[in-house]
Image (spheres, helix red, strand yellow):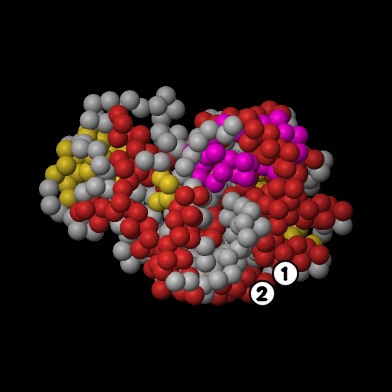
Amino acid sequence: PSRPTVPQFDAIVVGAGFSGLYQLYRLRELGLSVRLLEACVDIGGTWHRNRYPGARCDVESTSYSYSFSPELDQEWEWSERYATQPELLRYLQHVADRFGLRQDITLRTRVTRAVYDEDRHLWQVGTDTGERLTARFVILATGCMSAVKEPDIPGAATFGGRALHTADWPHEGVDLTGERVAVIGTGCSGVQAIPLLAEQAAALTVFQRTPVYALPAHNRALTAEENAELKARYPQFRIAQRQSRGGTVFEPPTRSALAADAAERAATYAAAWESGLLSGLLRTYNDILVDADANETVAEFVRSKIRSIVTDPETAETLSPRGLPYGTKRPCLDTGYYATYNKPHVSVVDLTRTPIVEITPSGIRTAERDHAVDVIVYATGFDAMTGSQIAVDIVGKGGTTLREKWADGPRNHLGLLSSGFPNLFTVLGPLSPSVLSNAVVAIEQHVEWITDCIAHLREGGLTEIDATADAEEEWCAHVADLADLTLYPAVASWYTGANVPGKPRVFLAYTGGLDRYRAQCDAAARDGYRGFVTAS
Ligand code: NA7
């Protein structure tokens, strides 16, 4: 049978989180036929899946929200400074309904395969429901924190109690009243969940491999006056946000921490601590992430705070990061986290001293002893940045798979297109500023660039765009060079891929700031899509 010369869809968007919903909206506005495929039972992405107790955003809701619709800004009312997962999910559902997006979304459909047809310049997309679709463009809006890292602990499958993962929490909720609960992992998910799990559990034992730096969230309800005031200045605020370094508005610091004396630093850090902002301490001086001595002044400040909150000195020391530069792993926002360890039924096991040997049918065995538990909560994170893309069998030009191409780390130009995989765009992909910025602002920048690019192709009657190998080479080197100016790459974190055994060690994000990144993307487009090659 002869094959159709035009694809079924102009574009297929993969994933219905913040990225995919906005991408669908924009492409539809352009008049394209679009299908959005989502693996889960509902839209929401990250905010659909991460339902563990305490899950909330740690960027202020008023800035962690879409800016593309002034009407949406005016009608939506955030109830708290830091929205909970249910509120964020309601917001995304509202957006989907308000802009009529659901009609183009297919739920419960996981994209498993995408093969590029070099002759016809289109992607053949396969799903786990057996669908076979074709589209000119595919946009991976699969999220940078969505491929769950399965526990790599011996014996995990033998556990006789209940095992839960924070990123795959049962929709009906879980009642832990009276249970002996273990939590493995103290990243942001663990830090948010632990205080609430402790409220229910009869005993809570936290298995900590690396302590985190957590700052008080100072979360609170937003008053009607605050909301009204915000809405009045939303138009200017959204512009400022777009022009900002990381998607949140602040004046970048210009002084070195080492140029200040101890008293001045102490006052500056204390004010940042009280701000309740995730990046508060990073905004104080300009060398926190580039100079180890400057960084140590912040690290010690946070440790002093931990000592002042946690009453047992030994526990305080266990919870205090040592030899880990502040901010090189993502800091967390604390709503009762450190104080929870003052409760008599909560304890922490330092896995650097007594590692987990195995999980047994009755609990967790460390090098020191057996811990009998009824429930294990894995807060062990994600195969971040690349995992959700590599999970799809993507076959590009010449039969090369994306997995093969990225075997030694992701390669692309501007974080947007990987050479040899034409017409396949990534939102919040690796080697973009994604996780180092307010994700929603980064998403809007990506989606708008991709949309403009597709519009440009269509206007010119072009059916293919690919990154050139040279531009890609240059971009990867540029991202690595910038990262090497900072303290980030030396630290084993999910930013470097070190949290997943066997994953190549590459710094996965662009550290130069969203503003500079945006300027480079815009310049490439303005110069006729420099670094890309098009065809018809
Ligand atoms: P993270 O930040 O990757 O945290 C995972 C935690 O789990 C971290 O403390 C890990 O320790 C720990 N972990 C992972 N594997 C193990 C094993 N095998 N044994 C013991 N401990 C382990 O994930 P989150 O879900 O908390 O947060 C992800 C991001 O989502 C967050 O930064 C926000 O951007 C939102 P490690 O540090 O590797 O020693």
Q: Is residue 391 visible?
A: no
**Label annotation for residue 531:** 1
x and y percentages locating residue 31 in the rendered image: 82, 40
Q: Is residue 381 above or below residue 263?
A: above
Disc 1 marks a residue whose amino acid type is Gly
x and y percentages locating residue 481 in the rendered image: 55, 75
Q: For numbered disc 1, what is the local secondary structure? A: loop
Disc 2 marks a residue whose amino acid type is Asp
Q: Residue furthest front?
A: 263
Q: Earlier in the sequence, mark 1 or mark 2?
A: 2
Q: Residue at x 62, y 41 (%)?
A: 62
Mark 1 closeness class: few <14, some 14–19, many ≥20 residues within 10 Å: some
Q: Is residue 252 above or below residue 103?
A: below
Q: Quadrant of residue 26?
A: top right
Q: Residue at x 46, y 66 (%)?
A: 264
User: Which segment did they paint magenta?
Assistant: 56-83
Q: Is residue 287 above or below residue 45?
A: below
- Distance from the alpha carbon under mark 1 to that under mark 2: 8 Å
Mark 2 closeness class: few <14, some 14–19, many ≥20 residues within 10 Å: few
Q: Residue at x 76, y 58 (%)?
A: 464
**Residue 67 belongs to magenta span:** yes
- Closer to the camera in the image, 521 or 233: 233
